[in-house]
Amino acid sequence: MFGFDPVVLLIVLLSAISAAAICYGILYSRIETQKKADSRVNRVKQAETDRVKVKAARDRVQEMSKRRKSVQDSLKDLEKRQSENTKQKQSLKARLGQAGLSLTPSRFYLISVLFGLFMMFILFIVGAPLLVILGLPFAAMFGLPRWIVSFLIKRRQNKFLNEFPNALDVITRSLRSGLPLNDSVRLVATEAREPVKTEFRRVVEAQQVGLSMPDACARMLNHMPLQEVNFFSIVITVQAQAGGNLSEALGNLSRVLRDRKKMKAKVQALSMEAKASAVIIGALPFIVMTLVSLTSPQYMTVLFTDPRGHLILMCAGVWMSIGIFIMRNMINFEI
Protein backbone atom coordinates (compact mmCIF):
# COMPACT_ATOMS: atom_id res chain seq x y z
CA MET A 1 0.00 0.00 0.00
CA PHE A 2 1.35 3.33 -1.00
CA GLY A 3 0.77 6.29 1.27
CA PHE A 4 0.00 9.77 -0.08
CA ASP A 5 1.30 12.82 1.66
CA PRO A 6 -1.54 15.33 2.24
CA VAL A 7 0.83 18.21 1.65
CA VAL A 8 1.74 16.89 -1.79
CA LEU A 9 -1.93 16.41 -2.66
CA LEU A 10 -2.76 19.93 -1.57
CA ILE A 11 0.10 21.33 -3.64
CA VAL A 12 -1.09 19.41 -6.72
CA LEU A 13 -4.63 20.62 -6.22
CA LEU A 14 -3.57 24.20 -5.81
CA SER A 15 -1.38 23.93 -8.88
CA ALA A 16 -4.31 22.63 -10.93
CA ILE A 17 -6.58 25.40 -9.72
CA SER A 18 -3.95 28.01 -10.48
CA ALA A 19 -3.39 26.62 -13.96
CA ALA A 20 -7.15 26.66 -14.61
CA ALA A 21 -7.40 30.25 -13.37
CA ILE A 22 -4.52 31.29 -15.59
CA CYS A 23 -6.09 29.60 -18.63
CA TYR A 24 -9.49 31.18 -17.91
CA GLY A 25 -7.86 34.60 -17.53
CA ILE A 26 -6.06 34.19 -20.82
CA LEU A 27 -9.10 32.80 -22.73
CA TYR A 28 -11.79 35.01 -21.08
CA SER A 29 -11.61 37.75 -23.70
CA ARG A 30 -11.90 35.22 -26.52
CA ILE A 31 -14.91 33.54 -24.86
CA GLU A 32 -16.69 36.83 -24.34
CA THR A 33 -15.93 37.88 -27.91
CA GLN A 34 -17.36 34.59 -29.21
CA LYS A 35 -20.48 35.02 -27.06
CA LYS A 36 -21.02 38.52 -28.37
CA ALA A 37 -20.49 37.33 -31.95
CA ASP A 38 -22.99 34.49 -31.48
CA SER A 39 -25.47 36.93 -29.96
CA ARG A 40 -25.10 39.31 -32.87
CA VAL A 41 -25.53 36.46 -35.36
CA ASN A 42 -28.69 35.32 -33.55
CA ARG A 43 -30.06 38.87 -33.56
CA VAL A 44 -29.34 39.20 -37.27
CA LYS A 45 -31.09 35.88 -37.99
CA GLN A 46 -34.05 36.91 -35.84
CA ALA A 47 -34.23 40.26 -37.62
CA GLU A 48 -34.19 38.50 -41.00
CA THR A 49 -36.94 36.15 -39.83
CA ASP A 50 -38.99 39.07 -38.55
CA ARG A 51 -38.40 40.92 -41.82
CA VAL A 52 -39.66 37.92 -43.77
CA LYS A 53 -42.73 37.67 -41.54
CA VAL A 54 -43.41 41.39 -41.84
CA LYS A 55 -43.04 41.19 -45.61
CA ALA A 56 -45.38 38.21 -45.78
CA ALA A 57 -47.93 39.99 -43.58
CA ARG A 58 -47.59 43.13 -45.73
CA ASP A 59 -48.13 41.05 -48.87
CA ARG A 60 -51.23 39.46 -47.35
CA VAL A 61 -52.63 42.86 -46.43
CA GLN A 62 -51.93 44.18 -49.93
CA GLU A 63 -53.55 41.11 -51.47
CA MET A 64 -56.62 41.51 -49.25
CA SER A 65 -56.84 45.21 -50.09
CA LYS A 66 -56.57 44.44 -53.82
CA ARG A 67 -59.24 41.79 -53.48
CA ARG A 68 -61.49 44.12 -51.52
CA LYS A 69 -60.96 46.87 -54.10
CA SER A 70 -61.79 44.43 -56.89
CA VAL A 71 -65.01 43.43 -55.12
CA GLN A 72 -65.93 47.07 -54.53
CA ASP A 73 -65.27 47.95 -58.16
CA SER A 74 -67.40 45.01 -59.26
CA LEU A 75 -70.26 46.04 -57.00
CA LYS A 76 -70.04 49.65 -58.19
CA ASP A 77 -70.09 48.50 -61.79
CA LEU A 78 -73.11 46.29 -61.16
CA GLU A 79 -74.90 49.05 -59.29
CA LYS A 80 -74.20 51.50 -62.09
CA ARG A 81 -75.53 49.16 -64.77
CA GLN A 82 -78.61 48.31 -62.72
CA SER A 83 -79.37 51.97 -62.05
CA GLU A 84 -79.10 52.64 -65.78
CA ASN A 85 -81.47 49.77 -66.49
CA THR A 86 -83.99 51.01 -63.94
CA LYS A 87 -83.86 54.55 -65.33
CA GLN A 88 -84.62 53.30 -68.79
CA LYS A 89 -88.30 52.69 -69.34
CA GLN A 90 -89.01 49.08 -70.16
CA SER A 91 -90.32 48.50 -73.64
CA LEU A 92 -93.55 46.69 -74.35
CA LYS A 93 -91.59 43.81 -75.87
CA ALA A 94 -89.62 43.37 -72.62
CA ARG A 95 -92.80 43.45 -70.54
CA LEU A 96 -94.45 40.85 -72.76
CA GLY A 97 -91.39 38.65 -72.29
CA GLN A 98 -91.51 39.13 -68.52
CA ALA A 99 -95.17 38.09 -68.56
CA GLY A 100 -94.27 34.89 -70.39
CA LEU A 101 -96.33 35.81 -73.46
CA SER A 102 -95.18 34.99 -76.98
CA LEU A 103 -96.97 38.00 -78.47
CA THR A 104 -95.19 40.63 -80.53
CA PRO A 105 -95.89 44.32 -79.79
CA SER A 106 -97.75 44.73 -83.10
CA ARG A 107 -100.03 41.80 -82.33
CA PHE A 108 -100.61 43.13 -78.82
CA TYR A 109 -101.66 46.51 -80.20
CA LEU A 110 -103.94 44.79 -82.70
CA ILE A 111 -105.65 42.78 -79.97
CA SER A 112 -106.03 45.96 -77.85
CA VAL A 113 -107.66 47.85 -80.75
CA LEU A 114 -110.00 44.96 -81.53
CA PHE A 115 -110.99 44.74 -77.86
CA GLY A 116 -111.71 48.47 -77.77
CA LEU A 117 -113.84 48.27 -80.91
CA PHE A 118 -115.72 45.32 -79.45
CA MET A 119 -116.44 47.32 -76.28
CA MET A 120 -117.60 50.27 -78.39
CA PHE A 121 -119.94 47.98 -80.36
CA ILE A 122 -121.43 46.53 -77.17
CA LEU A 123 -122.00 49.98 -75.67
CA PHE A 124 -123.58 51.21 -78.91
CA ILE A 125 -126.01 48.29 -78.92
CA VAL A 126 -126.89 48.85 -75.26
CA GLY A 127 -127.62 52.51 -76.02
CA ALA A 128 -125.08 54.14 -73.74
CA PRO A 129 -124.45 57.91 -73.94
CA LEU A 130 -122.03 59.17 -76.57
CA LEU A 131 -119.45 60.20 -73.94
CA VAL A 132 -119.46 56.68 -72.52
CA ILE A 133 -119.26 55.12 -75.99
CA LEU A 134 -116.15 57.16 -76.78
CA GLY A 135 -114.49 57.12 -73.33
CA LEU A 136 -114.93 53.59 -72.03
CA PRO A 137 -113.57 51.80 -75.15
CA PHE A 138 -110.54 54.12 -75.07
CA ALA A 139 -109.84 53.10 -71.47
CA ALA A 140 -110.46 49.45 -72.33
CA MET A 141 -108.13 49.71 -75.34
CA PHE A 142 -105.12 51.23 -73.58
CA GLY A 143 -105.72 50.43 -69.92
CA LEU A 144 -107.14 46.93 -69.50
CA PRO A 145 -104.64 45.01 -71.72
CA ARG A 146 -101.67 46.66 -70.03
CA TRP A 147 -103.18 45.92 -66.61
CA ILE A 148 -103.53 42.27 -67.64
CA VAL A 149 -99.87 42.22 -68.71
CA SER A 150 -98.83 43.73 -65.34
CA PHE A 151 -100.95 41.14 -63.53
CA LEU A 152 -99.30 38.29 -65.48
CA ILE A 153 -95.83 39.72 -64.77
CA LYS A 154 -96.56 39.89 -61.04
CA ARG A 155 -97.96 36.36 -60.98
CA ARG A 156 -94.96 34.98 -62.88
CA GLN A 157 -92.54 36.76 -60.56
CA ASN A 158 -94.28 35.27 -57.52
CA LYS A 159 -93.96 31.78 -59.02
CA PHE A 160 -90.28 32.45 -59.69
CA LEU A 161 -89.67 33.56 -56.09
CA ASN A 162 -91.35 30.44 -54.75
CA GLU A 163 -89.06 28.14 -56.75
CA PHE A 164 -85.83 30.18 -56.83
CA PRO A 165 -84.48 29.14 -53.36
CA ASN A 166 -84.95 25.48 -54.32
CA ALA A 167 -82.94 26.07 -57.49
CA LEU A 168 -80.15 27.66 -55.42
CA ASP A 169 -80.16 24.63 -53.13
CA VAL A 170 -79.77 22.34 -56.15
CA ILE A 171 -76.80 24.40 -57.37
CA THR A 172 -75.26 24.38 -53.88
CA ARG A 173 -75.54 20.60 -53.51
CA SER A 174 -74.18 20.09 -57.04
CA LEU A 175 -71.14 22.26 -56.28
CA ARG A 176 -70.46 20.42 -53.04
CA SER A 177 -70.64 17.09 -54.84
CA GLY A 178 -67.94 18.22 -57.28
CA LEU A 179 -69.84 19.45 -60.33
CA PRO A 180 -68.69 22.72 -61.94
CA LEU A 181 -70.96 25.74 -61.94
CA ASN A 182 -71.89 25.42 -65.62
CA ASP A 183 -73.16 21.87 -65.17
CA SER A 184 -75.05 22.87 -62.01
CA VAL A 185 -76.85 25.67 -63.84
CA ARG A 186 -77.58 23.32 -66.75
CA LEU A 187 -79.09 20.84 -64.26
CA VAL A 188 -81.45 23.52 -62.95
CA ALA A 189 -82.34 24.49 -66.54
CA THR A 190 -83.50 20.94 -67.24
CA GLU A 191 -84.99 19.82 -63.92
CA ALA A 192 -86.48 22.91 -62.21
CA ARG A 193 -90.06 24.10 -62.43
CA GLU A 194 -91.33 26.98 -64.50
CA PRO A 195 -90.54 29.87 -64.71
CA VAL A 196 -87.14 29.17 -63.10
CA LYS A 197 -86.48 26.55 -65.76
CA THR A 198 -86.97 29.04 -68.59
CA GLU A 199 -84.81 31.74 -67.00
CA PHE A 200 -81.89 29.41 -66.34
CA ARG A 201 -82.25 27.98 -69.84
CA ARG A 202 -81.67 31.53 -71.10
CA VAL A 203 -78.49 31.64 -69.00
CA VAL A 204 -77.27 28.38 -70.57
CA GLU A 205 -78.11 29.64 -74.06
CA ALA A 206 -76.25 32.90 -73.38
CA GLN A 207 -73.18 30.90 -72.36
CA GLN A 208 -73.38 28.84 -75.53
CA VAL A 209 -73.14 31.98 -77.65
CA GLY A 210 -69.99 33.13 -75.84
CA LEU A 211 -71.05 35.10 -72.76
CA SER A 212 -69.41 34.47 -69.41
CA MET A 213 -71.36 33.18 -66.45
CA PRO A 214 -71.49 36.59 -64.64
CA ASP A 215 -72.73 38.36 -67.78
CA ALA A 216 -75.29 35.63 -68.48
CA CYS A 217 -76.62 35.84 -64.91
CA ALA A 218 -76.72 39.64 -65.13
CA ARG A 219 -78.89 39.36 -68.25
CA MET A 220 -81.45 37.46 -66.19
CA LEU A 221 -82.46 40.82 -64.71
CA ASN A 222 -83.83 41.87 -68.09
CA HIS A 223 -86.44 39.11 -67.98
CA MET A 224 -86.91 38.89 -64.20
CA PRO A 225 -86.21 42.31 -62.59
CA LEU A 226 -86.20 41.25 -58.95
CA GLN A 227 -83.91 42.00 -56.01
CA GLU A 228 -83.41 38.26 -55.45
CA VAL A 229 -82.05 37.83 -58.98
CA ASN A 230 -79.86 40.87 -58.39
CA PHE A 231 -78.38 39.20 -55.28
CA PHE A 232 -77.68 36.03 -57.27
CA SER A 233 -75.96 38.00 -60.03
CA ILE A 234 -73.79 39.85 -57.50
CA VAL A 235 -72.71 36.60 -55.81
CA ILE A 236 -71.71 35.02 -59.12
CA THR A 237 -69.85 38.15 -60.27
CA VAL A 238 -67.94 38.61 -57.00
CA GLN A 239 -66.97 34.94 -56.88
CA ALA A 240 -65.74 35.03 -60.47
CA GLN A 241 -63.54 38.08 -59.86
CA ALA A 242 -62.41 37.64 -56.25
CA GLY A 243 -62.79 33.92 -55.62
CA GLY A 244 -64.25 32.30 -52.53
CA ASN A 245 -66.50 29.44 -51.51
CA LEU A 246 -69.37 29.69 -53.99
CA SER A 247 -71.41 26.85 -52.48
CA GLU A 248 -71.37 28.50 -49.06
CA ALA A 249 -72.31 31.88 -50.56
CA LEU A 250 -75.23 30.41 -52.52
CA GLY A 251 -76.36 28.46 -49.46
CA ASN A 252 -76.40 31.66 -47.42
CA LEU A 253 -78.28 33.42 -50.22
CA SER A 254 -80.90 30.67 -50.30
CA ARG A 255 -81.40 31.00 -46.55
CA VAL A 256 -81.70 34.80 -46.84
CA LEU A 257 -84.30 34.48 -49.61
CA ARG A 258 -86.37 32.09 -47.53
CA ASP A 259 -86.17 34.45 -44.55
CA ARG A 260 -87.33 37.32 -46.80
CA LYS A 261 -90.25 35.20 -47.98
CA LYS A 262 -91.23 34.40 -44.40
CA MET A 263 -91.02 38.06 -43.46
CA LYS A 264 -93.21 39.05 -46.41
CA ALA A 265 -95.80 36.45 -45.45
CA LYS A 266 -95.75 37.67 -41.83
CA VAL A 267 -96.17 41.31 -42.88
CA GLN A 268 -98.97 40.35 -45.25
CA ALA A 269 -100.77 38.46 -42.50
CA LEU A 270 -100.42 41.37 -40.09
CA SER A 271 -101.66 43.88 -42.66
CA MET A 272 -104.68 41.89 -43.85
CA GLU A 273 -106.99 43.63 -41.37
CA ALA A 274 -105.91 47.05 -42.63
CA LYS A 275 -106.31 45.93 -46.25
CA ALA A 276 -109.82 44.62 -45.56
CA SER A 277 -110.74 47.92 -43.90
CA ALA A 278 -109.33 49.85 -46.86
CA VAL A 279 -111.32 47.74 -49.33
CA ILE A 280 -114.53 48.23 -47.37
CA ILE A 281 -113.99 51.99 -47.04
CA GLY A 282 -113.12 52.32 -50.73
CA ALA A 283 -116.13 50.27 -51.89
CA LEU A 284 -118.66 51.82 -49.49
CA PRO A 285 -119.47 54.96 -51.61
CA PHE A 286 -120.10 52.83 -54.70
CA ILE A 287 -122.27 50.40 -52.73
CA VAL A 288 -124.31 53.25 -51.26
CA MET A 289 -124.71 54.89 -54.69
CA THR A 290 -125.89 51.59 -56.19
CA LEU A 291 -128.43 50.98 -53.41
CA VAL A 292 -129.78 54.52 -53.59
CA SER A 293 -130.06 54.23 -57.39
CA LEU A 294 -132.12 51.05 -56.97
CA THR A 295 -134.42 52.47 -54.30
CA SER A 296 -134.71 56.10 -55.48
CA PRO A 297 -133.60 56.48 -59.12
CA GLN A 298 -134.84 60.10 -59.37
CA TYR A 299 -132.65 61.08 -56.42
CA MET A 300 -129.44 59.93 -58.17
CA THR A 301 -130.18 60.83 -61.78
CA VAL A 302 -129.54 64.51 -61.03
CA LEU A 303 -125.85 63.72 -60.64
CA PHE A 304 -125.72 62.34 -64.19
CA THR A 305 -128.03 64.83 -65.95
CA ASP A 306 -127.19 68.19 -64.32
CA PRO A 307 -123.80 69.89 -64.98
CA ARG A 308 -123.47 70.60 -61.29
CA GLY A 309 -123.87 66.89 -60.63
CA HIS A 310 -121.07 66.20 -63.11
CA LEU A 311 -118.83 68.60 -61.16
CA ILE A 312 -119.76 66.87 -57.90
CA LEU A 313 -118.98 63.45 -59.38
CA MET A 314 -115.64 64.68 -60.70
CA CYS A 315 -114.64 66.17 -57.33
CA ALA A 316 -115.79 63.03 -55.53
CA GLY A 317 -113.75 60.86 -57.92
CA VAL A 318 -110.64 62.97 -57.35
CA TRP A 319 -110.99 62.82 -53.57
CA MET A 320 -111.71 59.08 -53.68
CA SER A 321 -108.60 58.51 -55.81
CA ILE A 322 -106.45 60.50 -53.37
CA GLY A 323 -107.86 58.56 -50.41
CA ILE A 324 -107.34 55.17 -52.10
CA PHE A 325 -103.77 56.15 -53.02
CA ILE A 326 -102.99 57.16 -49.42
CA MET A 327 -104.53 54.00 -47.98
CA ARG A 328 -102.62 51.86 -50.48
CA ASN A 329 -99.29 53.41 -49.44
CA MET A 330 -100.17 52.94 -45.78
CA ILE A 331 -100.91 49.21 -46.07
CA ASN A 332 -98.21 48.20 -48.57
CA PHE A 333 -94.76 47.41 -47.13
CA GLU A 334 -91.59 46.73 -49.05
CA ILE A 335 -89.36 43.99 -47.62
Image (cartoon, grey):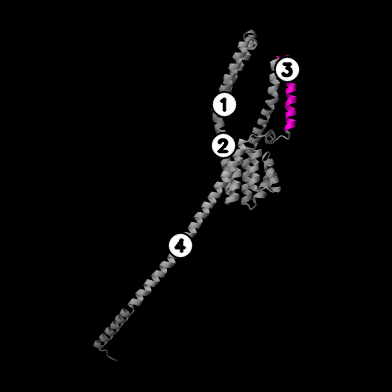
Residue type pointed to by label 1: Arg
Q: CA distance from mark 2 to mark 4?
A: 53 Å
Name of the residue lying farthest toward the bottom? 1
User: Mark 4 touching mark 3, by CB under 8 A?
Assistant: no
Q: Nearer the viewer, mark 3 or mark 1?
A: 3
Give the side of residue 60 with respect to residue 147, left or right.
left
Quadrant in the picture for residue 330: top right
Residue type pointed to by label 4: Arg
Q: CA distance from mark 4 to mark 3?
A: 91 Å
Which residue, given by chain and number where applicable, does mark 1 sit on? 328
> Which residue is painted at 43% across and 65% down in the image?
46
SS under mark 1? helix
Q: Nearer the viewer, mark 1 or mark 2?
A: 1
Q: Is residue 19 visible?
A: yes
Q: CA distance from mark 1 to mark 4?
A: 66 Å
Q: Position of residue 100 (x, y in %)?
A: 70, 35
Which residue, given by chain and number where applicable, does mark 2 sit on? 262
Numbered mark located on residue 51 in the image:
4
Q: Earlier in the sequence, mark 4 or mark 3?
A: 4
Query: Which range is magenta?
Result: 105-129
User: Dot 1: few (<14), some (14–19), or many (≥20) neighbours within 10 Å?
Assistant: some
Which residue, given by chain and number where applicable, does mark 3 sit on? 123
User: Dot 4: few (<14), some (14–19), or many (≥20) neighbours within 10 Å?
Assistant: few
Q: Earlier in the sequence, mark 1 or mark 4?
A: 4
- Magenta segment: does it hold 312? no
